[in-house]
């Protein structure tokens, strides 16, 4: 059975984006933090995206390695992003590209099916999609890079749940710029 990981940069008050989908609170890209996310992505076999995150990622990463100011890590991330298989869950998109398959039906049923397959870890991104997987008990690992900023509202990392989810702390460490990494596994 595959492992499903939900990880993102998050504010201290629990948001992945401030109102208006503003992610400027995370500051300019930091090489060490970017390298951390790159290392994580290199170990992912399948990326699962909701529509909004897919549109943000696909508007930048397919050609990011061609930018004259791209760092070696950004070049490697762009190439890995293109090469890694992806599934986008959307009822409004009619096509996707960049090594991606579109699912317009029941996201929870498809994620459940994908988890049951043999293979390496999957990563889920997008607040709405992750919320559905969270409520269905499908997420095995939560990875948060908590930044020292309060934004007071926006898109929350965690969703309202019907039942408690007990977690085990696996890792915590300081990151650049005062951020803190915490990684939890779901207690089954």
Image (cartoon, helix red, strand yellow):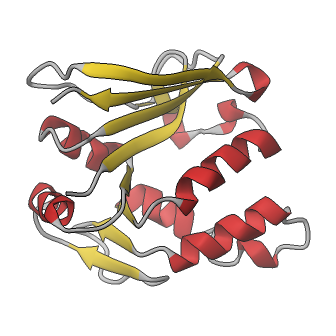
Front residue of this view, candidates 164 and 169: 169
Can you say which quadrant of the picture contains the N terminus?
bottom left
Query: Which residue is outermost to the right?
Result: 68
With respect to residue 95, does 158 lie above or below?
Answer: above
Residue at (33% x, 70% y) in the render: 87
Residue at (90% x, 73% y) in the render: 68
Q: Position of residue 2 (x, y in %)?
A: 26, 57
The answer to whether residue 175 is left or right of residue 23 is right
Residue at (21% x, 19% y) in the render: 166
Residue at (60% x, 71% y) in the render: 80
With respect to residue 79, does 122 lie above or below?
Answer: above
Front residue of this view, candidates 178 and 94: 178
Q: Is residue 133 visible?
A: yes
Q: Position of residue 187 (x, y in %)?
A: 21, 26
With respect to residue 66, does 50 lie above or below?
Answer: above
Q: Position of residue 178 (x, y in %)?
A: 73, 19
The answer to whether residue 85 is left or right of residue 22 is left
Task: Determine which quarter of the picture holds residue 131.
Answer: top left
Task: Determine which quarter of the picture holds residue 54.
Answer: bottom left
Front residue of this view, candidates 149 and 110: 110
With respect to residue 10, does 42 lie above or below?
Answer: below
Q: Position of residue 176 (x, y in %)?
A: 77, 28
Q: Is residue 18 visible?
A: no
Task: Determine which quarter of the picture holds residue 64.
Answer: bottom right
């Amino acid at each position: 059975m595959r492992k499903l990981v939900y990880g993102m940069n998050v504010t201290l008050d629990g948001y992945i984006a401030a109102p208006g989908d503003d992610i400027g609170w995370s500051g300019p890209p930091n090489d060490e933090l970017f390298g951390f996310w790159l290392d994580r992505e290199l170990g992912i076999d399948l990326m699962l995206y909701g529509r909004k995150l897919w549109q943000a990622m696909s508007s930048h990463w397919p050609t990011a390695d061609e930018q004259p100011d791209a760092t070696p890590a950004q070049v490697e991330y762009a190439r890995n992003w293109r090469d890694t298989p992806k599934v986008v869950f959307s009822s409004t998109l009619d096509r996707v590209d960049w090594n991606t398959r579109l699912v317009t039906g029941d996201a929870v049923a498809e994620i459940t099916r994908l988890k049951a397959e043999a293979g390496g870890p999957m990563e889920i991104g997008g607040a709405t999609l992750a919320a559905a997987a969270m409520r269905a008990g499908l997420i095995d690992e939560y990875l948060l890079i908590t930044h020292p900023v309060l934004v007071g509202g926006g898109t929350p990392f965690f969703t309202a749940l019907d039942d408690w989810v007990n977690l085990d702390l696996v890792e915590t460490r300081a990151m650049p710029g005062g951020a803190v990494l915490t990684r939890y596994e779901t207690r089954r």
